Image: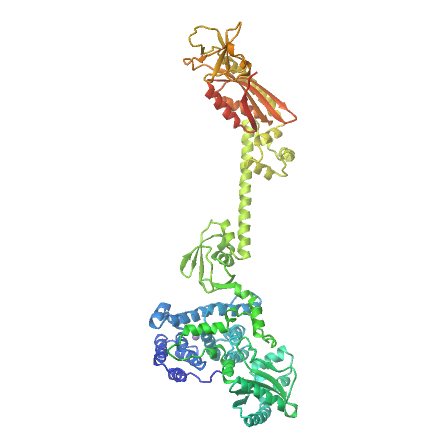
Amino acid sequence: MVNDHMNPSVDDVMDEARKYIHDPISLTLIERAANYASVHHAGQFRRSGEPYTVHLNSVAYILATLRVGPQTIAAGFLHDVIEDCGISHDELAGEFDGEIADLVESVTKIGTLQFKGKNDPEYQAANHRKIFIAMAKDVRVIIIKLVDRLHNMRTLQYQPEASQKRIAQETLDVYAPIAHRLGISAIKNELEDLCFYYLNREEYYRIAHLVEAKKAERDANVSQMISEISEMLREHDIPHRIFGRSKHLYSIYRKMITKHKRFDEILDLLAIRIVTGTKQSCYETLGYIHAKYHPIPGRLKDYIAVPKTNMYQSLHTTIIGENARIFEVQIRTEEMDAIAERGVAAHWRYKEGSKYDARAEQKEIEDKLSWFRNLTVYSEEENENTTASEYMEALQHDVFAANVYVMTPKGRVIDLPNGATPIDFAYRIHTDVGHTAVGAIVNDAMVPLNTELHTGDVVQIKTMKGTGPSEDWLKFVKTNQARNKIRNWLTKKETENHLNRVDEGEKILADELRKRGFNPKEYMERKKLENIYKEFRVSNHTDLMYGIAVKSINPTSVCEKLTNQKAHISEQAALSRVLGKEAQHRVSKSGLVIPGIESMKMSLAHCCLPVYGEPIKGFITKTEGVKVHRIGCPNIAGAKARLIDVQWDEGDVERYYDADVNVSARDRSFLLTDIVTVVSQCKAPLESVNAAVNHDTLTSTIKMVIRVHDISHLENVIANLRKVESVIDVERTAH
Ligand code: MN
């Protein structure tokens, strides 16, 4: 037991503190904290019916017995004022200081943790220990919390039975292992025995009675051995304390269970501890004992040279005494003994002096216990052959270093990989929360969704219905869960888009059919469509329509295939009707002048058909007057002597000029229709048209004579023809 002092008063706490704290300012701080707590908790009572301050005084008192610093004792008095009195962190910081306020706040935060979660109790317990340590951040917070729990366990009889079991189980799973890991064996042993009592009362009493029954005999044997060894050490002038020690009940029970030993096998191991002055005298003591008694081979452990990871140091040996009785002997210095009992707390005991710096002290402790933050694994029976460095190495690989623990506003703990963001958090809460997340509030401040979360953060997600995840999220999320959910959502969305595109494709095809005088209902029958899948290298309706919508499949080609080339026939028929009408508009005035010459017979050459506005030359014929050619016409090249300058008659802009135009294109149906449509849209009447398909190259050559006002009109028609789908080239010709 850490102490058996029932319900200590504030004076008792001060007396204990004065044993090692002498600075009046520090002592005043502790008194002020005690006073502040009693004022604010006034009128509050525990289930036992006692004033609440009984709990606070007890916690502060136990802390003082652990020799912690004045701020930690003060925080012990104050540890429930945020939770139970509604005092804020800032008020506390103002009244005392920021450090004390931080300690109390952290203790409160751990108190709000809900240790619920995965079904596997082993996983759960290990995880909760990690969370607990990670949340605490400061070793002093853990010590306060352990002491708080110790006092609550001592007074657990006032709780209802269901609460007793739950609290005892949590203490055994989470608190006792942490106490062990921090080397505070005094607290760990007491917690374990209290838990044992509440969780398995029958076994507790059975073992307690067995221990009691053999106690006298064991005590006699131990006493005899103690006086023998003590006498021997006095002869060698080695100063020492020597005493027998009793195993606590839960450790006996655990050994019976895990090592399958009978009660007497465990209890027959008699235990003696020798505390001496220096490391040197520890080894000397060991030497004398081994010289006098027979040591059992393989049982010597030198934890002085190689300390355990919780800083425990001692020499362990097992010897055979009188009547073949076996004794376990521990040899250590006072310093080592203090560490063995109080662990971290002992290491960190308050040192007075003007240069004392609590932060530096905190850092020193954490450096010494560099595993502290990585505290993850707790094995009931730590392998005694594992050295501190091996253990450290193993910890390096532990997942803990890669985890952060954040909380919902209600205190639910969510564990996430290092670097996780509010989006990872959101998907852990619920898929829909992730999908509709639009903002995050971390510790009361709005933050970007890619903000890295840290242990202890309180995270809240803002959602908005009808929104969805962004592809950008994939760049920063850390959990596979979030990544998969985002991907699934995006894929689903794409499928929906795809289906919309299918509708779009159907509409385009129907329009195309309608435009050409076909009934879409008739031609878009499933069977008809199925027949043409192969032609377009698709295997289903969806792909065909999607192709049409995204323009990878030409709807006119689909029309053609669906209507079995019928289009060609009707197109030709329609075309000849158009041409017949346009032939009526023919005009035949030349519209040319030869400077200085009147009424000269002039006509436009049929080989190159010049149009108004483009550069021209006159060629004097023998019988037909002047024939006007384009300047580049091959038929007048090398005939310079018979050429004459001619000009367009500017007064005659309303007339039309014929022009030869050749279109070459990849063959497709409705090509001719499309070309005629363009020509017509350009208001260039069609004089004649002639289409020929080259079946080897699958190209179409369309020769047209169109009628234009001038060269720019012609250039406009050509430019528009070049834009028609599948057109390769458009050029004027000369015969
Ligand atoms: Mn408390």
Which quadrant: the C terminus? top right
Figure check: 257 above or below 227: above
Asked whether residue 141 is in view, the answer is no
Name the spot of residue 422 as percent of width and height, x first.
Answer: 47, 57
Left or right: residue 436 compared with residue 249:
left
Ligand 1 located in image quadrant: bottom left
Q: Is residue 182 found left or right of 700 in the rendered image? A: left
Vertical order, 558 against 243 (above or below) = above
Quarter-of-image position of residue 222: bottom right
Q: How is the image coloured?
A: rainbow
Q: Quadrant of residue 728?
A: top right
Work out whether residue 446 or residue 558 is closer to the camera in this orientation and state it: 446
Name the foreground residue: 212 vs 727.
727
- At 54% from the left and 79% from the top, the residue drawn is 312
The image quarter in which residue 511 lies: top right
Q: Is residue 350 above or below residue 539?
A: below
Q: Is residue 644 visible?
A: yes
Q: How many marks?
A: 0
Which x, y percent locates residue 171?
51, 74
Which of 645 and 441 lies nearest the eye of the viewer? 645
Q: Residue at x 50, y 25 (%)?
A: 719
Q: Position of residue 435 (x, y in %)?
A: 49, 52
Q: Nearer the viewer, residue 479 or 117?
A: 479
- Give the percent coordinates (x, y) of residue 649: 43, 12
